[in-house]
Image (cartoon, grey):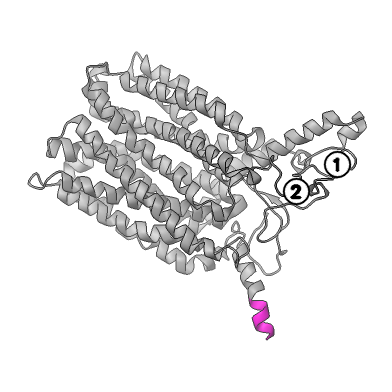
Amino acid sequence: MDSTCKPSQTYPPSPTTTGSCVTLDSVGSTEVKSPTDDKSFNVLEHPSSPVTWNGPGDPMNPQDWSSRKKWMTTLVASAVTINATFSSSAPSSATERIIEQFAISSEVSYAVTSVYLLGYVFGPFFFGPGSEMLGRKPVLVVTMCCYTLFILGQIFAPDIQTLLVTRFFSGFFASSPLTIGSAILADIWAGKDRGLPSSIFSGSVFLGPALGPLVGGFVAESSLKWNWIFWVMFIFAGASTFIMILLLPESCAMVLLSKKAKRLRKQAETPEIAKTIYTEHERKEIKMGEVIRLTLYRPFQMLAEEPILVLVTAYMSIVYGLLYALFEAFPIIFMDRHGLSSSQNGLIFIGVGIGSTLGAFVNWYLTQNLYVPHYARWKGFPPAEYRLWGAMVGSPALVIGTFWLGWTGNYESISWTVPAVATIMLGFGIFLIFTSFLTYLIDTYLMYSASAFAANTTIRSLVAAAFPLFTVQMFQNLGIGWAASLIGFIALLLAPSPFLFFKYGASIRTKSKFAPCIDLKIAKELEKPKSSV
């Protein structure tokens, strides 16, 4: 399907099911009008009509859930994500204990983090499409149970090979909440209400890695055995999975409507009537070749053809890689240079968490004041570039924080508190850049955002997996100041990206095969009265 923004395109767009189970049938609306929207309508008496929601306020429709249920769902999804990302960094504080236990080199020990992140590369290709066919909750339950069981393999690993293999599969299954979590938010929150929930969920993506070294540092310094950090991970994983099973409801509209259709078929008076009760999704023929094309080919096709996706992915990959590079750089800066203990070094990550929290509030404020006010005028589809305000604040903060950390952390004569404060600036910048660009991709590609996310996640996870492998050598060979400066100069080179996208993004989108550009079509509609005066 060619979504190029040409004047000859049908306007408004026809009903389309997006990758996150949201349907669009007209600009500014997310309701699909059909006879069954009437609450008095009985589908059993009109079996030729597809099954859909019973009008506005249908309690089955995730978009019409109560605020309490929406927030519970958001918080549970965020908690599971914290758990999944916590495990990515927690063993980094136990590196010395792992080296001693398995008699391995430092270089091999860095792979404990890298192989986990490598698992993030492959998971999204399976779990995103799987959640749209089977439901969000079943996929999350199965993957999080598998993730928890593979942590047991790490606890009892007899050799480094077993540890690395089980770490990879833990990362593979842990990518499920990262992939599905954002889709759950799209299922239940309207675009104009998604600012704060998105900030909280994005914060969970960064809070987990920040908590890992904090907890791991205290475990590593204790008299407990080397594998107790994995016991902590196992207990945390089991508890969060149990809570998820109890409290997380299914939210995918296609799956919920299919369940409704099955229930109505059971209530039908005759088998003939039952056969005529269906949902639009059930009538679509799913071909394996098409599934493979959409899940494996399209993401890389977009990466080859979409300049917006390429540049955003490059920037986010550097930012994500920097986050995981900190786990190897902090011991060099704060333990080797400033003499802090392992547990004290872990406490430094509180700064990243504080910065991310501040970034979440700033992102929410910018969304409420610079995005939401445009929602009505643009009939629910403001220009995607209005999502970039956070990145425009975060990109300079990242550059400042990187140089600040490197050159104040380089000298023993400067108190460790000075580079520690720089971590707040780093967390602040990383969060705002990450969150802004993720929402920018959603608003740019809409029904193709799942493919854009798959490409983005693959590349940035590969980069993040590579960063820990060379971070220590880079900081030891170049020195703390110049190693941080190298990253800082790359961040400086990419810093103009959100400003350039804000100015030129709309014109770039008009040449895209995958960007629907609904806002540009609305702009033409808004100009019509003026031209007729």
**On screen, residue 508 above or below 236:** below
The magenta segment is 527-533
Q: Position of residue 74 (x, y in %)?
A: 52, 40
Q: Is residue 30 visible?
A: yes
The residue nearer to you, when weighing 45 against 290, is 45
Observer-nearest residue: 383 or 66?
Answer: 66
The residue tagged with tag 1: helix, strand or loop?
A: loop
Label 2, on which residue? 55
**Identity of the amino acid at label 2?**
Gly
Residue 60 in picture, x, y percent from top left? 69, 39
Can you say whether 217 is above or below 371 in the image?
Answer: above
Q: Main secondary structure of the magenta part?
A: helix
Task: Mark yes or no: residue 479 visible.
Answer: no
Count of all numbered marks drawn on residues in the image: 2
51 relative to 297 in the view: left or right = right
Identify which residue is drawn at 36% across, 60% down.
393
Residue at image position (18%, 41%) is 333
Label 2 crowd bin: few (<14), some (14–19), many (20+), radius 10 Å? many
Q: Residues within 10 Å of mark 1 (few under 14, many from 20)?
A: few
Residue 91 on image: x %, y %:
31, 27
Q: Amino acid at mark 1?
A: Asn
Q: Secondary structure at mark 2?
A: loop
State the residue position of label 1.
Answer: 42
Sequence-first tag of 1 and 2: 1
Query: For the point 21% across and 24% down, which residue is it?
Result: 221
> Viewed as shown, does residue 524 lie left or right of 160?
right
**Residue drawn 53% across the image and 56% down it:** 305
Of all residues, the one furthest to the left in this rendering is 413
Q: Quadrant of the N terminus?
A: bottom right
Quadrant in which the C terminus is drawn: bottom right
In magenta segment, residue 491: no
